[in-house]
Amino acid sequence: MDVIVKASAEAVADFVHEQLLEHIKLSPASVLGLPTGGTPEPIYARLVESYRSGLVSWKDITTFNLDEYIGLGADHPGSYATYMRERLFDHVDGPAEHHHIPNGLAGDPAGEAAEYEGKIAAAGGIDLMLLGLGQNGHIGFNEPGSSFQSRTRAVDLTPSTIAANQRFFGAGELPPRKAISMGIGTILEARRIIVVATGEVKAVAVRRMLGEQKTPDLPASALQDGRNVMVVLDALAASEYRGAPFVP
Ligand code: F6R
């Protein structure tokens, strides 16, 4: 794991944006795995700017989002489909069919998850997976206790994750309690992974991810086994982490 610490969240976004830009320029038909949440917002804003400046095209890029809430349609303001259209997809080129997000309204979430897994395989797997980090160490919506071999599936969200995501919903509206999420096993198969964490609220999860023996209690610790993993932190997220990654 390469660990890179930048002074601020802005500097993290600049750096990760550069990494993605270089990747897309070198591999304009690649398959990206994408997160939602607060962390990637400044990265998506920079990607939209670089598209508008003519630096990059998304026309041959395929994307797979990590997760979607069960019970929310693609047009619901709190859905991850809406999040992605508003932050990225509506502002770059490339047909909507290239952008995959699990269907939160599927009558059979298990079937939808299996189909999603099949679509990732049919696309040749994920070349570059961008990940955020939950305060409880989740990646995607793989909450503590998730198997490192898990595949895309329906999952229950923990109360702390529901509370952390309340800010994306209107007053009086609770986020759903279930989601479809790529599995940890699915994520680990990506050929390259960039994990991004900013802010003091992530400091404990970062310390445990990098410095402790891997355990399903801290799903992100599975990344210690990942191929080609880069962790990009701001100084606050890195503030509890001292020294080298845990070596068993
Ligand atoms: C979202 C996702 C989650 C988030 C994580 C951090 O698609 O998969 O794992 O990356 O909850 O969220 P933020 O960035 O809002 O702190």
Image (cartoon, rainbow, N blue to C red):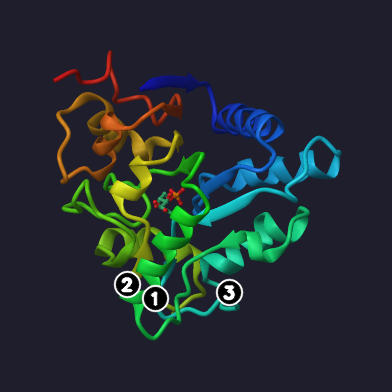
Disc number placed over residue 70 in the picture, else none: 1
Left or right, 83 with respect to 238, comes to right
Disc 3 to disc 1: CB gap under 8 Å? no
At which x and y percent is residue 149? Answer: 22, 49
In the image, what residue type sits under mark 2? Answer: Lys
- Residue situated in front as seen by the camera: 111 or 13: 111
Residue at the image position 27 percent from the left and 48 percent from the top: 136
Residue at the image position 61 percent from the left and 52 percent from the top: 62
- In which quadrant of the rendered view does residue 8 lie? top right
Label 1: how many Cα within 10 Å (few below 14, some 14–19, many 20+)? many
Count the labels in the image: 3
Q: Is residue 114 above or below residue 43?
A: below
At which x and y percent is residue 92? Answer: 76, 53
- In which quadrant of the rendered view does residue 52 lie? top right
Left or right, 61 with respect to 128, comes to right
Q: Residue furthest bottom?
A: 107
Q: Which residue bears the numbered disc 2? A: 178
Disc number placed over residue 77 in the picture, else none: 3
